[in-house]
Amino acid sequence: MGILAPIEWVVAWIIVGAHRFFTMIGFGDGPGIAWILAIVLLTIVVRAAMIPLFVKQIRAQRGMQMIQPELQAIQAKYKDKKDPASREAMSRETMAMYKEHGTNPFSSCMPLLLQSPIFFALFRVLNAIGPIARGERAGIGPITQSIATDMQGSNFFGAHLSDVFTSTESTAARIVVITLIALMTISTFFTQRQLTMKNMPSAAMQGPAANTQKMMLYTMPLIFAISGVNFPVGVLIYWTVTNLWSMGQQYYTIKRMPTPGSEAEEALKLKRANKAAAKGITLEPVTANGLVEEPRGQRQQPQRKNRTKKG
């Protein structure tokens, strides 16, 4: 029994439970769309359970963005010092700064790290569907041979849930896989771009951390595009849905609670100012770049009250 076995068992129960829910509300039992929707519901359950972690991730990312000037100052201080003592001092000052601000670069990765075991457990469960259906191995939790046969018979636009691009001979399955990989790659790119371009202050767009963010903007989608050919269709459905969830959740968060100093915050200020103006409330007009707009028209020159005209 592997280390992922308990998670595989939980994943199997959620999928079977979700399938039972969809059959109860009118979807047909046996092979069919209910098994596809069960994976979608699994994604929603997982992401809903991770909302508190997402909130912590947003706070950690904001903390990292706000301390970028201090971090760059520490890096500049030790830029030309390569001796071990200086490296240790730089590390000590950096960690002290993280502690002072209550953030660190690993906090923003926590949701992805916690989701990874679920991802790999689902991968293993879907890979086992074929062998379970053929009686070549034991079931996983509630997934018996008969249930595995139903899952194996379910298809998504002509592709079975366990089909993998590198092993299937079905043209329809390969088209579905390529389409899902494209959706997964595009959604990953726009989710990263939304975060780096719209919700980061100008100070955070410079330095090593910003360069890492820009690199991830292009490397993460590329990694998914290359590795996606080894994923079963069910895993690709899960990852595409979770990416769409992330994009929507992040869009809502950025729109409602933008990072101070970011383009998103400036847009929110402008929107609030325009709403206030529409209600007849006088506020200082704010432009998209966050500057106060000067009143238009000819400016009246101030005059002294005791100024007299000389004859």
Image (cartoon, rainbow, N blue to C red):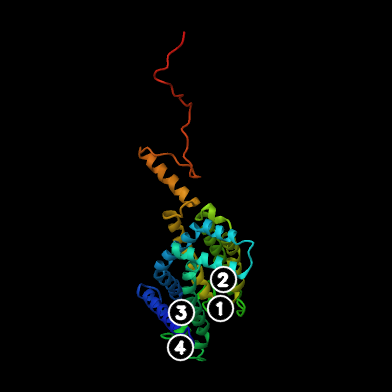
* Residue at mark 3 to residue at mark 4: CA–CA distance: 17 Å
Q: Between residues 156 and 256, which one lies in front from this camera angle? A: 256
- Disc 1: CA contacts within 10 A as few (<14), some (14-19) or many (>=20): many
The answer to which of 153 and 196 lies nearer the viewer is 196
Look at the numbered disc 3 and give the secondary structure of its residue. Answer: loop
| Image: 31 above or below 52 | below
10 Å neighbourhood of mark 2: few (<14), some, or many (≥20)? many
**CB within 8 Å, label 3 to label 4:** no
Q: What element does badge 4 sit on? A: loop
Q: Callout 3, which amino acid? A: Pro
Front tag of 3 and 1: 1
Q: Position of residue 266 (x, y in %)?
A: 47, 48
> Would you name the residue on which mark 3 appears?
31
Circle 2 sits on which residue?
176
Q: Nearer the viewer, mark 1 or mark 4?
A: 4
Query: Secondary structure beneath disc 1?
Result: loop
Callout count: 4
Asked whether the residues under the numbered discs 3 and 1 touch, taking CB atoms below 8 Å apart as contact, a structural biologist would say no
Reading the chain from its start, which is encountered first: label 1 or label 4?
4
Mark before the other along the chain sequence, 3 or 4: 3
| C-alpha gap between disc 3 and disc 1 | 15 Å
Please give the name of the residue rendered at 44% of the width and 87% of the height, measured from the top-left corner: 144
> Is label 2 in contact with label 1 (beta carbons under 8 Å)?
yes
Residues 170 and 4: in front is 4
Labelled pair 1, 4 in contact (Cβ < 8 Å): no
Q: Earlier in the sequence, mark 2 or mark 4?
A: 4
Residue picked out by circle 1: 163
What's the residue at 51%, 77% (across, down)? 161
Judging by the rendered image, the residue that carries numbered circle 4 is 139
Comparing 228 with 82, the one in front is: 82
